[in-house]
Image: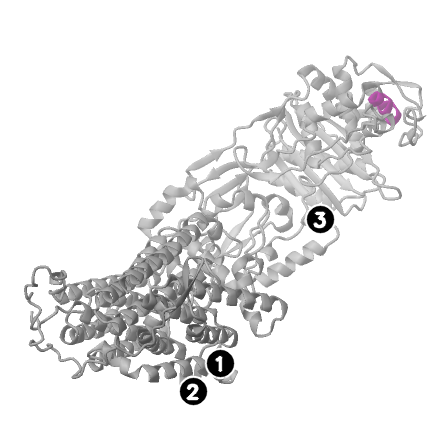
Amino acid sequence: MNAPLRRVGVVVMILFGLLFVNLNYVQAIKADEYRNSDYNARVQVAEYERKRGIIEAAGTPLTASRETDGTLKYLRTYPKGEVYAHVVGYKPVNLADTGVERSENEFLAGTSDQLLPDRLWDLFTGKQTPGGDVLLTISPRAQEAAFKGLADNRVGATKGAAVALDPRTGAIQALVSMPSFDPNPLADHDTKKAQEAYDRLVADKDGPLRNRVLSETFPPGSTMKVIVTAAALKQGYTPQTRIPAGSSWLPPTAGQPIRNAAASICPESEVTLLNALTESCNTGFARLGVKLGAQAIKDEARRFGFEDEELTVGRLNGDGQPVAASRTGDMLAPGGQDDPPSVAQSSIGQNDVRMTPLQGAMIAAAIANNGRQMRPYLVDRLLGPDRTTQYYKAAPKELRQPVDGDVARMLQDMMVNVVRNGTGRNAQISGYRVGGKTGTAENGVGRPEHGWFIGFAINDRGEAVSAVCVFLESAGSGGSAEAARISGAIMRAVIADRGGR
Amino acid sequence: MTAPPGSVATPAPTGELPRVRFASSRRNAELALLLFAMALTAAYAATVEATLLDEVTHDFWVPTAAVTVVFLALHLVVRFLAPYADPVLLPAVALINGLGVGFLRRLDLAYVTPDERADFPIFAGIGGRQLAWTLAAVVFAALLLVLMRDHRAVSRYAYTLGLAGIVLVMLPAVLPRRFSEINGAKLWVIVPGVGQIQPGEFAKLALLVFFAYYLVRKREVLSLASRRFLGIDFPRGRDLGPVLVVWAISLLVLIFEKDLGTSLLYFGMFVVTLYIATERVSWLIIGLLLFFGGAFLAYFLGGTVGGPFANFYLRAQIWLDPFEDPFQGGYQLVQGLLGLGTGGLFGAGPGGGQPDLVPEVHNDFIFAGMGEEIGLFGLSSLLVVYLLIVERGLRAALAVRDSFGKLLAGGLSFTLGLQVFVIVGGISKLIPLTGQTTPFLSAGGSSLMANWLLIAALLRISDAARRPVESASTPRPSGGPSRPPAQLHGAPTEVIRP
């Protein structure tokens, strides 16, 4: 009976070998996946043991961590509530985190590799050093102005977006999506309450959780004319070049006639390019666009950042919130050649053209910065728990150069003229060269139009101080003028935060 | 050092089997290993307190000391009553048992608030109960060693034990639910107000004694009478009877007690002893086919008909993808896997994890709970200790001279190994999860006691195996049974050669 006994011994060895191999699979290969699984409450408890770092803007704390008696030690609170909700995001217990809370989670939680020395030190001292702090580029005054401007808009819009950035660096100065929400209930340690709060926000048909600045695209209306103008200037047009216009124009082959917003706008058969932009002449730009061709417009839009699917806004060398790609649509007939009605509509920012408010601000910023578009970012610095060790400082990066200096300066002058003499008068700031372009985008038959304004402010030393985009969703008539007014207010706040310079 | 007479090597005649290496009783090695195991247990308890209480209390050593005392007592019993027993078995089991008590106490500390932890009494909670059970189980193991001076003696009670085994297996199945069902498995006999026992744990031992006895008597019929098919010798139809009976019992257990693990355990136990007895691979093939056929049928019926098969079907579904239903059916397995994964290679350290997040962590999932804290390296070491116990048992089976002892020791060792495989494989998603205790680790008196009895039996058999062969004139040091048991080999058999 010894031979089978020996074989049974081998069988037991094999069975234990299987156990061993499988344990290796579970504890070594799958370890990270299991450790960070959404169903794993361990990581969570450990994460809440350590005081989370704070997120702040120019010395204003936007988050706080309060000690509690519960299993989860620190409760995350957001003292500024709705105002910064779409910038900071939130860090809930069970739900997905968002915003800077998400993109800088490891640093805030103290688990990032950069903070390893601190954690090693903890092993000796037995204390839990808090996570690191994240300093944002936001200008608190501009953020408040943007939030207030949108909330108290005079055309009764309930939805919209505002974003401002520094044209010379790309640092975001303000970022507001309306309606906003209070992140505090979402971070509640009572996960049931948090879930209820979340469900309520999701059910809200105005979509308060949606980030209209970064993740939503809308038809840009006449702000698109800036891109068409840039394309024309590159082909040898000047602001004084006369282009065909008229009160109504039917693009060849088919479609609806293009009309102007008012009968007083460019009824002449020809106007200068400058006047066409200043008055926002639809017929002029539709005909100009068809003449330049779909490819020229698409190329120009791409040079300003359309079709970019890679852009994120956060840290320049790391993660951030993804930005939805702005699109021009293909403007082609089924045969592959230009479809003039589509090109005409697209040239005035209708048809299939869609743009994020951030893209609008980036167009204005590139022009204000003499043609160089900087990569937008939100995180300025990362500081260690001791508040002196600096782990990161943003080094601004050029993203692309859509136009050369000469064209940029011509566009600056033309846009300044829009604010000085044309549709953007509401954005004026005394002592600054403010340029911009309004937009009114049709949004389906019978629905109120969207109002847009993109613009910039340049100080007396020729430095571009701020570029903005304000968007009022379904604002109806007067929306773009109101957007221009809010833009002016935001830029004035930026200037005030800079000490009036 | 009082070495029992005969332990000093009587030089073996040259040309004899190399029995010289058995001549030393190795009891001092056992004592040293045991003390080492207890030192590990104490270190574990101290680490747990340092992590959970931020201090090592003055009486951290008390639970370890308590189990050490009984293990030492058992060691003394072995020293006098089974002096040649394998010196590794007792320390290895003591280590696992001691760590189990330590881990259960660690769980008790996790369930109370941090302020109450330092004052948590030693004999309270699951850990305290396990400590008490350990004391009782070791006493019973010692009693078995005292009463059973020769393992062959139990063969006299083989039929009684066989009947008792079947009754114990079937008891939970026939009792009404409220007297027999806990957590969906009808494995218990519950005496309201008193407690509950898991008769299957003891039935395992009783049935094994019967199998060993029966197979030794029948081995020649079973191994010789055969038909050749596809180059393998298959038994005659009428010899299949007992195998089919055990198979049917296993399936009944599976269906009516809703317990795949026990069913697999009984059947595996029987098939392997049958194989050892007959040396016929065909029995293994038949056994495996019957078991997998039965399990697949139960799965199929569970998916279509439901009824008594539904539980098995559900378990198989959870095994296939626990994350499909992570909060209901798959919750326990998912949490166990997450615990194991979180532990990773080195674990969070004793007391450093959150094993209390896993349901039933003191019981079926104790291996996952410990895995979170001692990591892959710790669990692998534990598995090696289990493997050591099993292989030591098999070694005793190889060395013992009588067929009954060989079968019994082989069956007991394999059953222990199979049980570890079934439960550890279950919690790590290697095989469908079944309700089994982890021997010597899980909380629970029945399992602990039955497995300690199993170890006592192995100690007894290994003692017989390693005892130097002496001339008939030398009396046994501790005195064996007055009469050698019935000559098992010579039992009447009808050998029919086709």
According to the picture, the residue beneath numbered tag 1 turns out to be B173
Which residue was labeled with disc 3? A179
Say which amino acid is labelled 3: Pro
Number of disc labels: 3
Secondary structure beneath dot 2 equals loop
Q: Which one is nearer the viewer's eye here, A97 or A465?
A: A97
Image quadrant in which the C terminus of chain A is located: top right
**Coordinates of residue B203 in the picture (x, y in percent):** 38, 78
Whole-percent x and y of residue B170?
45, 81
Comparing B166 with A255, the one in front is: B166
Do tag 3 and tag 2 residues touch (Cβ < 8 Å)?
Answer: no
Tell me the crowding category of disc 2: few under 14, some 14 to 19, or many 20 or more residues within 10 angstroms, Cα based. Answer: few
Q: Residue B207 at x, y = what percent?
A: 36, 77
Q: Separation of disc 3 and disc 1 at Cα?
A: 63 Å
State the image coordinates of residue A269 (x, y, percent, origin top left): 93, 19
- Secondary structure type for disc 3: loop
Q: Which residue is mark 2?
A: B193
Give me the chain letter of mark 2: B
Chain letter for mark 1? B
Secondary structure of the magenta portion, mostly? Answer: helix
Q: Secondary structure at mark 1?
A: helix
Magenta segment, which residues? A281-290
- In the orientation shown, which residue stands out farthest toward the top? A236
Quarter residue A221 falls in: top right
Q: Residue at x 61, y 43 (%)?
A: A87
Res. B238 image quadrant = bottom left
